[in-house]
Image: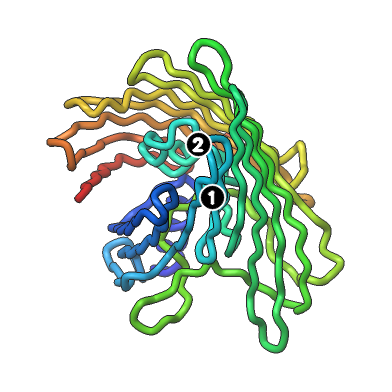
Amino acid sequence: MHDDEFLQDSEALSQAGIRTGINSRFSVETTVRQNDTLVAEFVASEKHKNDLSDLSECSLSLAKVSYTANVCDWLSAIAIPVGAQCRDVALLTNPSHQGKGLTDLSSFGPPLLNERNGSAIGLMVKKANVVASLAQFVSGQVGSSRVGHCFSMFGQVVCQLPARTKLSLLGLHQAPKLSSEHVHYVAPAIGLGDLVHHPSPETTVEAYTPPLGTISQENVSTGSIAVMLESELDEITKIGGWIEMKQSNPKHLEWAVTISDDSEDSFGWGVSLNGGLGAQGPQSWNHFQVESYMKFNLGKRLNVKPGITTHILDGKPRMTAFMLQSNWFL
């Protein structure tokens, strides 16, 4: 009974995009050939093991390695051999404001940006008021006797509109080419102690995923597309929204609308509405969530963010949570 209650609590927190415990990220960046950049990211976290008061430790792990080559003013290339996400090759209009919401659902944009796809190479092209990005991903998993591979293609176009507004169109096409009968992919994060692959504690947005069955070569290619719209009301107040159609199914949608004042001064705030709907076989689901927070900056490197979020599933209140989140930058 105790384990069942813990699983239900964990599932509710996950669906609401609420992270618990302590997450740490260390980034090492160096300049190569004046214009190029080499970055290595290490992550560690403490997560709940048996109940909400029992924390398990996670050692420091290598989560990502990336190399960005700025060929010229309008062309750049990126290679990510370890830990690639669509976010790494996406053109985020306000990257400094990513991750500053209260939960994952309001912080990180469409879920397809947080897809983990192993390794990647990509190109970014700038032309007047239009910027485009294109990347190829490949991921693999060693099974009991064979190796399976999945290839994905990500693309994005960003247009600068009048009144400090930007419109983005994103797409992810997944074409699995698998040789094993049962494949389960885990995002790679290489442990420094034993070099064993562990799931990275990097933030990911939880979204509805149909039950996994047997994977075969007959798997049909799938994909997701999303539209993002962001506007600056003034220098610190921003409003944005996005909608994503998942698995090429117009009946499977995720969306969010957020307005925030994330000033680096003493006080900030944010409000977000997000939700989704979909169907898988005879099962259908829909969820809605509202959240708000205040942010208090205690100096330039520490902030405290109290807030409240309410999660509604299939028209019934699932959970209301009071949250206290803090960030400390070295």
Residue type, numbered disc 1: Asn
208 w.r.t. 160: above or below: below
| Residue displayed at 29% across by 67% down | 55
Q: Nearer the viewer, residue 210 or 192?
A: 192
Does the rendering let one see residue 19? yes
Specify whether 113 is left or right of 27.
Answer: right
- Say which label, 2 or 1, has the lower sequence index: 2
Task: Check whether the beta carbons of the residues at disc 2 and disc 1 lie within 8 A of each other.
Answer: no
Tag in front: 2 or 1? 2
Residue 92's tag is: 2
Q: Does 127 sit above or below residue 319? A: above
Q: Spot the residue most to the top.
A: 163
Separation of residues labelled 2 and 1 (CA atoms):
13 Å
Vertically, is 238 above or below 87? above
Residue, x 47% and y 41% (percent of image)?
108
Q: Tell me residue 75's x, y (percent).
A: 58, 41
Q: Quadrant of residue 250?
A: top right
Q: Is 153 placed left or right of 238 in the picture?
A: right
Instruction: Please name the amino acid that badge 2 sits on.
Output: Leu
* Residue 233 located left or right of residue 79: left
- Give the crowd class for mark 2: few <14, some 14-19, many >=20 residues within 10 Å: some
Label 2: element kind: loop
Residue 114's mark?
A: 1
Circle 1 SS class: helix
Image location (x, y in percent) of residue 210? 69, 56
Looking at the image, is 163 positioned above or below residue 13? above
